[in-house]
Amino acid sequence: MSNLNNDSMGKRLDSVAIIMDGNGRWAKMRGLSRSEGHKAGAKAVAEVLKLFREYGVHHLTLYAFSTENWKRPKEEVDALMELIYMYVENVVIKTLIKEKDLCVRFIGDKSVLPEKLREKCIEAEEMAKDRPFVCNVGLNYGGRDEIVRAANRAFSDGHRELSEKILSGYMYTAGSPDPDLVIRTGGDFRISNFLLWQSAYSEFIILDTLWPDFGRSDIDKCIKEYYSRNRRFGGLDPEDGESEANIT
Ligand code: IPE
Ligand code: IPE
Ligand code: MG
C-alpha cells in the first residue's frame, strides 16, 4: 500500500464513491458522439479500480447509470446498456473477478434493465461474494428510490417502526461502510441522487477533470485533499474538545 493513504492522523480512507461525470463533454470537445465518450469513460474504470486498490481502499462505489438517466435519448440509453453489458462480460467477469480477486455488486433496481444485462450482472455477483476488495456499481441507482424501497421492504418484513440501523440494513449497500469520500468529476457541485443516505458525513471533492481523463494524478490529489480535511461528525476538533474539557 502506498504511503499516501496512511492513518497517521487517526483517519483512514477505506471507502470511496465516485460520480463518474463528463463523458458527453469529453466526446463533444473531440467532435465524437456521446456514445464514444461513454466508451472512453468505460476504459478509465479498470485503472481507477487498480489504483484505489493499491492505496488500500477496500470499497469503491461507482455511479454508472442513474434512475434519471432513462430520460436521455433512446439511442444513447441503448448504447450505454450494450456498453455496460460488454464491460461486465469482458472486463468485470474475465479480469476483475477471475484474475484480480475483486467482488462486484450492482446496486440499484435491476428489474427494469434489459434481461441479458440483468442476468450478466447477477452472474458476476454470484461468482465472488466474500472478498476484501469490493466494487459497487450503481446501475439504475437512485438514492431516493433506494430509501423508499428499503422502507417498504422493512415494513413487509414486519417492522412496524424503523430505526437508522434497521433502515441501513435494507439499503443496497448493506454491509459496506459509508463512503469516507465522494468524488465527482465534470465540475458540477451536486449529488444527482447518489448515496443520499450513506453520504451524510462523507467528504466531497469536485474535480473539473472529465471522467475519461481521470487517473493517477487526480487520485493522488484527492487522497491528499482528503487527509487535509478535518472530519468532525458534528463534534469538535480534538484540541478544541480538550480545551473545553479543561474549562469545565
Ligand atoms: C456520465 O457522463 C455518464 C452517465 C451519466 C451515464 P455524462 O453522459 O453525463 O457526461 P456529460 O455530463 O454530458 O458531459
Ligand atoms: C450523474 O450524472 C449520474 C452518473 C454519473 C451516472 P448526470 O450527468 O446524470 O447528472 P446531472 O443530470 O448532471 O445532474
Ligand atoms: Mg453528466
Image (cartoon, grey):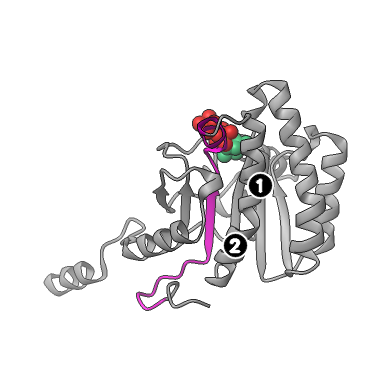
Task: Please tell me whether residue 22 belongs to the stretch shown in magenta.
Answer: yes
Q: Is residue 208 above or below residue 246?
A: above
User: In the image, 163: left or right of 86?
Assistant: left
Ligand 1 in which quarter:
top right
Label 1 Cα neighbours within 10 Å, binned few <14 / some 14-19 / many ≥20: many
Task: Pick the residue in front: 104 or 3.
Answer: 3
> Which residue appears at 75% of the width and 45% of the height?
157
Amino acid at the residue labelled 1:
Ala
Percent coordinates x, y for residue 31 in the rendering: 56, 29
Of the numbered discs 2 and 1, the one sitting upstream in the chain is 1
Judging from the image, what secondary structure is the residue with disc 1 in?
helix
> Which residue appears at 53% of the width and 61% of the height?
15
Q: How many marks?
A: 2
Q: Which residue is mark 1?
A: 42
Task: Please tell me whether residue 21 belongs to the stretch shown in magenta.
Answer: yes
Given contact means CB atoms under 8 Å apart, are the residues at marks 2 and 1 in contact? no
Q: Which residue is mark 2?
A: 59
What number is the disc on residue 155?
Answer: none
> Which residue appears at 71% of the width and 28% of the height?
77
Q: Which residues are magenta?
A: 7-29
Percent coordinates x, y for residue 3 in the rendering: 44, 78
Amino acid at the residue labelled 2:
His
**Quadrant showing the C terminus:** bottom left
Judging from the image, what secondary structure is the residue with disc 2 in?
strand
Task: Pick the residue in front: 205 or 241.
Answer: 205
User: In the image, 247: left or right of 198?
Assistant: left
Percent coordinates x, y for residue 115 in the rendering: 87, 36
Percent coordinates x, y for residue 2 in the rendering: 49, 76
Determine the residue located farthest toward the left in the rendered image.
Answer: 247
Task: Pick the residue in front: 198 or 4.
Answer: 4
